[in-house]
Amino acid sequence: MVHLITEISKYTMIILFALYTYQCFSSLKRSVDKEEQAEKYRSQVVYMYMFHLNAYAVLFASTLNTEILKFYAMQVVFFAAVQICYGIFYKRVSKLVVNNMCMLLCIGFVMLTRLSYEHAVKQFWIAVVSMAVTMLIPYFISKWTFLRNLTWAYALAGITMLGVVAVLGAVSHGAKLSFSVAGIAIQPSEFIKIIFVFFVASMFYESTDFMQVAKATIVAGLHVIILVLSKDLGAGLIFFIAYMVMLYVATRKLYYFAGGLLCGAAASVVAYHLFNHVRVRVVAWQDPLAVFENEGNQVSNSLFAIGTGGWFGMGLNQGMPNKIPEVKQDFIFSAISEELGGIFAVCLILVCVSCFLMFLNIAMQMKDTFYKLVALGLGTIYGFQVFLSIGGDIKFIPSTGVTLPLVSYGGSSLLSTLIIFAVIQGLYLLRERTEAEREAQKKEAAPKLAAKKAGRKKGGIGKKEGTEKKQESAGKKPKRKGGRKSHEENIHGTKVENFD
């Protein structure tokens, strides 16, 4: 009976998530009016809750653990509270971004519950606290204008925090990534990447001349060098790509971008020869089966899981994702592919793409250069992190140890991603308020313009006539085209009287 429920539910979940994904892109059409768009967003919420219920029904049927039902109820309350709070306090926010944020969290909770109930509960409480903390960020972003003036404060904070990790950080998988505070592990690079974006945006907001670009490049390079010395190469790569994209958009000079990519390629070759764990990951990427017992174990098991799942998956609790080391952090996409199927995994990628496109859309519509670059930088960080995580899982690129935002286990990653989403919502609010003010100004000016036009039509006089009357009132004779002149000029430019 349990097997039958699992088989039916996996198709149901695929259909529900496919419908949700379709609404993500259909709501972005320009031809869709506001009422139709709002209806699509409401249907997305319904699909999310139906998927959530279906998944936890299967998990309960498979384990008969009543704690799972309590955990499910707490999640429903959490998602409802998030939707209601955004609806009450931020009526102009992007509903698509809110829905996608909740949907990705929902998928993460489902898979973590399947992999480790204790880790899922811990992740849930981190999400609750993080959401409460970040709920005020949209308001502050839309109101505070002094953020663009803190250029060197951003630089100092970022370099100092990275330096502390490089010196005092705990070593994890060959890299210094975090340190503990009151028993809680904190990975500062997850938060510094947000500060870094604000630094670069404020630098290029002030100027984009050569000296300013040189200063920004030196500081950005210092961030990356500290990360490289800490052997946190995944974060270093994210910082580098975000800076290059922002540099190109701010300056519109292709040779800056091309030169940066060449320097990055040279640095990657140097890193390969300097760091042993980089060589290990490259070897595992080139031929994981040849080194299955050691370096290629993670990648090989990831590929086995994806291949075993096929298009429709094995069903929740029917696969063996725990054979993959670090499956909860780095390889959760492989676990999703194995148990929920390739179609579900493709839809997950498309939902992440819709978030990225929404970020870019907001960046393009911002008039202020500082806010435009902030939205672009945060969107680039989010999109590139998704690419690194999924690309490493499917052996498209060497594994970088980067988590899948909002889905993978990890408190620092979860909080930093929620901050990014909150900042983007703040920029969206700012854009909507600016457009509303412009529309109000147009409406106020419309009656005045109409009155002016009506006055010209009724009692107005022609331009030529009006000019002549003004000249007459000033005691001047009007100039008339085609008439005989009262004075003529000789070839030397002097006036002679006409006695005719």
Image (cartoon, rainbow, N blue to C red):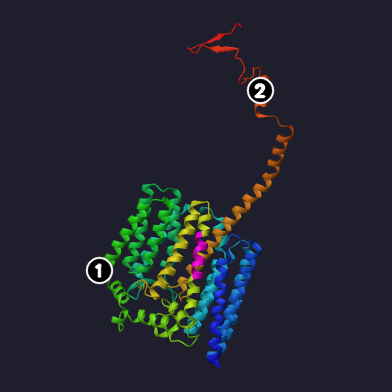
Residue at the right extreme, as displayed: 458
Q: Indicate whether 194 appears above or below 175.
A: above
**Between 490 and 386, which is closer to the camera in this rendering?**
490
Quadrant in the picture for the N terminus? bottom right
Q: Quadrant of residue 310?
A: bottom left
**448 horizontally vs 408: left or right:** right
Among numbered discs 2 and 1, the one appearing first in the sequence: 1
Residue 325 seen from this side: no
Main SS type for the magenta part?
helix
Provide residue 221's location: percent of width, then percent of height.
34, 58
According to the picture, the residue beneath numbered tag 2 turns out to be: 468
Tell me the crowding category of disc 2: few under 14, some 14 to 19, or many 20 or more residues within 10 angstroms, Cα based.
some
User: Does the segment drawn in magenta span residue 409?
Assistant: no
Q: Secondary structure at mark 1?
A: helix
Q: CA distance from mark 2 to mark 1?
A: 85 Å
Provide residue 223's location: percent of width, then percent of height.
36, 61
Quadrant in the picture for the C terminus? top right
Q: Which residues are magenta?
A: 350-360
> Of the residues shown, which amino acid type is indicated by label 1?
His
Provide residue 299's location: percent of width, then percent of height.
36, 79
According to the picture, the residue beneath numbered tag 1 turns out to be: 273
Numbered circle sitting on residue 433: none
